[in-house]
Amino acid sequence: MEIWINPACSKCRSAVRLLDAEGADYTVRRYLEDVPTEDEIRAVLDRLGLEPWDITRTQEAVAKELGLKEWPRDAASRDRWVTALAEHPKLIQRPIITADDGTAVVARTDEAVRDALSR
């Protein structure tokens, strides 16, 4: 199990505390420092069953600079979104937990963290 975190994020810290409390075996990835490649982002999206715009933080300043809210959300634009996430990792929703069964969850709630633990 791996968790992508930003240590400054309260939801990330909460998820890590819950993983620790449950005695989970996991690896922390500080994705702002260890930036995921486009292929890694695609793999996580596949595991999540989501599209890149589903995990994009559109309220970030860089999202506004890029005009992401106006970008098309369709198959033809998917690579453009993935590239933006790789080039600006701050746009990636957090925390993301990749579960042992090959799935993943955006673990913004305790329930989502427990869901990942149960997989």
Image (cartoon, grey):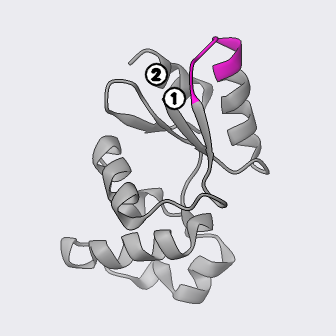
Residue 115 is tagged as 2
Image coordinates of residue 25 in percent, x first then y, are: 57, 19
Disc 1 crowd rating (10 Å Cα; few below 14, some 14-19, many 20+) is some
**What kind of element bears circle 1?**
helix
Numbered circles on residues, count: 2
Residue 8 vertical position relative to residue 75 in the rendered view, above or below: above
Q: Depth check: give the residue in front, 108 or 90.
A: 90
Q: Depth check: give the residue in front, 19 or 50.
A: 19
Q: Whole-Å distance between the Cαs marked 2 and 1? A: 5 Å
Q: Which residue is at a point 28% across and 48% down the rendered structure image? A: 46
Image coordinates of residue 102 in percent, x first then y, are: 31, 32
Residue 39 vertical position relative to residue 29 in the rendered view, above or below: below
Q: Which residue is at a point 69% across and 19% down the rendered structure image? A: 20
Q: Is residue 23 left or right of residue 103?
A: right
Q: Which residue is at a point 46% across and 76% down the rendered structure image? A: 84
Which residue type does callout 2 highlight?
Asp
Q: Is residue 68 left or right of residue 73?
A: right
Q: Which residue is at a point 59% across and 16% down the rendered structure image? A: 24
Q: Is residue 50 magenta?
A: no
Range of the magenta residues? 19-26
Q: Is residue 101 left or right of residue 112?
A: left
Q: Is residue 25 magenta?
A: yes
Q: Badge 1 is on which residue?
A: 112
Which residue type does callout 1 highlight?
Ala
Q: Is residue 79 left or right of residue 26?
A: left
Image coordinates of residue 52 in percent, x first then y, are: 38, 62
| Mark 2–mark 1 CB contact (< 8 Å) | yes
Classified by dominant secondary structure, the portion drawn in magenta counts as loop
Which picture quadrant has residue 58? Answer: bottom right
**What kind of element bears circle 2?**
helix
